[in-house]
Amino acid sequence: MIDIQQNSPLTLLQNLGFWRAGEIIKSTSVPGESNMNLVLRIETNLDSYILKQAKSYVRKYPQIAAPISRIEIEYQFLKQLDSNPFLASLSPKVLHYDAQNHLMLLEDLGEGSDFLSLYGGQRQLNSEEIQHLAEYLMHLHQLEITNFPATGSMRVLNHEHLFDFPFLEENGFDLDSIQPGLQEASMPYKTDAFLKQRIQALGNRYLTDGKVLMHGDYYPGSWLQVSSGIKIIDPEFGGLGDAEFDLGVFLAHLDLSEQAEELSAQVQKHYNLTVDWSLVQQYRGVEILRRLIGIAQLPLSLCLEAKKTLLARARTYLIS
C-alpha cells in the first residue's frame, strides 16, 4: 500500500495518477485537525484538493486500531448524496477513489474552520444555523438507500468508546489528568447498575442496522464554516442506523457547548420527520457521558461543577 504522510515528497503525490494532463503539485498543507484519517490539502498549478487516506489506526490516537475500510464507507456515503441536490451542495464531491490504497481525492470546499470553538464559548449558534443543521439531517434521513456497505467493524469501534469503555470502573484512563476531581465525579456513573443496564441495551440497539442513512458523528467537528456557508464532512461512522442517533448526538453537543436552551427546541421544530424522541434523549445522554468521562475528550472550558451538572442531566435523559 502507498503510505502517505503529512511530509510526503511531492514526487510521491504527483505519481498517484489523480491529476489532469499538465497538472503539477506545488505544495501540501494540513487543512485542520482530523481525528480518524490523514488529511492533506493539495495545491497544484490548476486547482486545490483534499486528499484523505485511511490507515489501520486512529490518526489522533495511534494506539487505537481502526478498520481501514472506513474510507470506503465515507466514499459510499458521499456518493449516496449525489441524488439529493441539497445534500450534495453541502458536502465535498468525490473526484477520485483508490480502493487499493485506501485513498480518496475530494473537492476542496475552501478555507474554513470547524465549529469546535463552540466549546470554548467563543461563539453561539444562531437560529438560522440550527435550522440549516437540522434540515441536513432531515434530508439525509429521507434518502432511499440500497446496497450500502456493511459498517459493522466501524460500529463496533464506536460502540466500545460510546457504550463500554467510559463506564468501566478500571479502564486505565485517569480522568484527573483531564481535570482534577473528574475521576471521583465519574464513579457514580460507572457503578450505577441500573444506568449501565440501560446503556448496554442502547448499545445493543446501536450495533443493529437501522432503516436510515445516518452521518454517525454529527458534532461540531464535522461542521465546516466556509465562505459559501456551513458544509458537513467526515461521515466515516456513517451507515444504516437510527435517525435518533444523529439527533441525539446533535443535541448532546448543544448541551456540551452551553448553547441557548431554546435551540434544542428549534431542532425538534425544524426536524419534522416522525422519530422516537425518547430514544433521541437516550442517545443524547450517552453521548454527553462518554464525552465527559470517556477517552474522546473535547476542548471544553467547563468547570468541574458544570460537568457534574451535565453528568446528572445525561443520566436523566437515559432513565426518564
Image: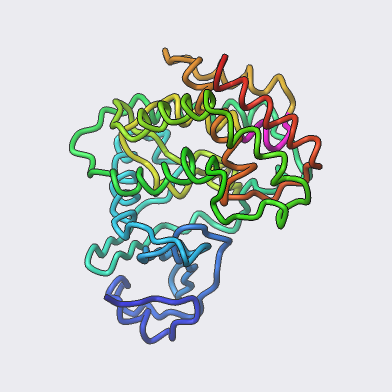
Name the quarter where the C terminus is drawn. Answer: top right
Q: Give the residues drawn in magenta, as a range.
A: 253-259
State yes or no: residue 286 in magenta.
Answer: no
Q: Nearer the viewer, residue 170 or 70?
A: 170
Looking at the image, residue 63 sits to the left or right of residue 31; the answer is left
- In x, y percent, where is residue 313? 67, 24
Q: Please give the name of the residue rendered at 49% of the width and 81% of the height, measured from the top-left corner.
A: 7
- In x, y percent, where is residue 298? 65, 49
Up the image or down, 277 lies above or below 15; here it is: above
Name the quarter where the N terminus is drawn. Answer: bottom left
State yes or no: residue 258 in magenta.
Answer: yes
- In x, y percent, where is residue 164? 46, 41
- In x, y percent, where is residue 176? 72, 53
Is the image coloured rainbow, by chain, by secondary structure, or in one colour? rainbow
Up the image or down, 245 lies above or below 76; here it is: above
Q: Nearer the viewer, residue 269 or 42?
A: 269
